[in-house]
Amino acid sequence: MASITIDLSDSQFQKLERLATAHGIATDVLLKASLEDWLSLQEDDFEKAADYVLAKNAELYRRLA
């Protein structure tokens, strides 16, 4: 497994700790879950955009084939 180190300001770290505490989880667990959600959203957005372009240009692609 790879690891990464990031620099946070004191206020960012305090917010992170408060949020993790409010949810009853460790800060690293919160960060990992948040990152996984963000990456998933990015992938979903790309797939939606690709589907839109393919559908919009389907007739053009059919003619060019």
Image (spheres, grey):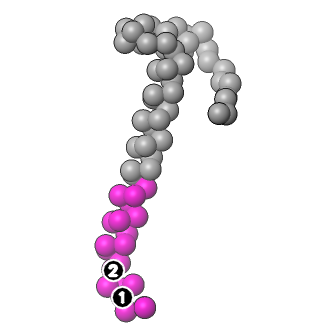
Tell me if residue 65 comes above or below residue 26 in the rendering.
below
Label 1, secondary structure: give it: helix
* Quarter of the figure that contains the N terminus: top right
Tell me if residue 18 comes above or below residue 60 in the rendering.
above
Residue to which mark 1 is pinned: 62
Instruction: Name the residue furthest front.
Output: 1
Residue at point 54%, 19% (across, down): 28
The quarter holding residue 41 reads top left
Residue at point 45%, 29% (across, down): 34
Q: Are marks 1 and 2 in contact (CB under 8 Å)?
A: yes
Q: Which residues are magenta?
A: 46-65
The label shown at residue 58 is: 2
Would residue 15 be seen by someone viewing this image from the given angle? no
- Residue 35 at x, y = what percent? 49, 32
The local crowd at label 2, few if under 14, some if 14 to 19, many if 20 or more residues have their Cα within 10 Å, is few
Q: Amino acid at mark 2?
A: Ala
Tell me if residue 38 comes above or below residue 63 in the rendering.
above
Q: Main secondary structure of the magenta part?
A: helix
The label shown at residue 38 is: none
The quarter holding residue 38 reads top left
Q: Amino acid at mark 1?
A: Arg
The reply, left or right, for residue 37 in relation to residue 2 is left
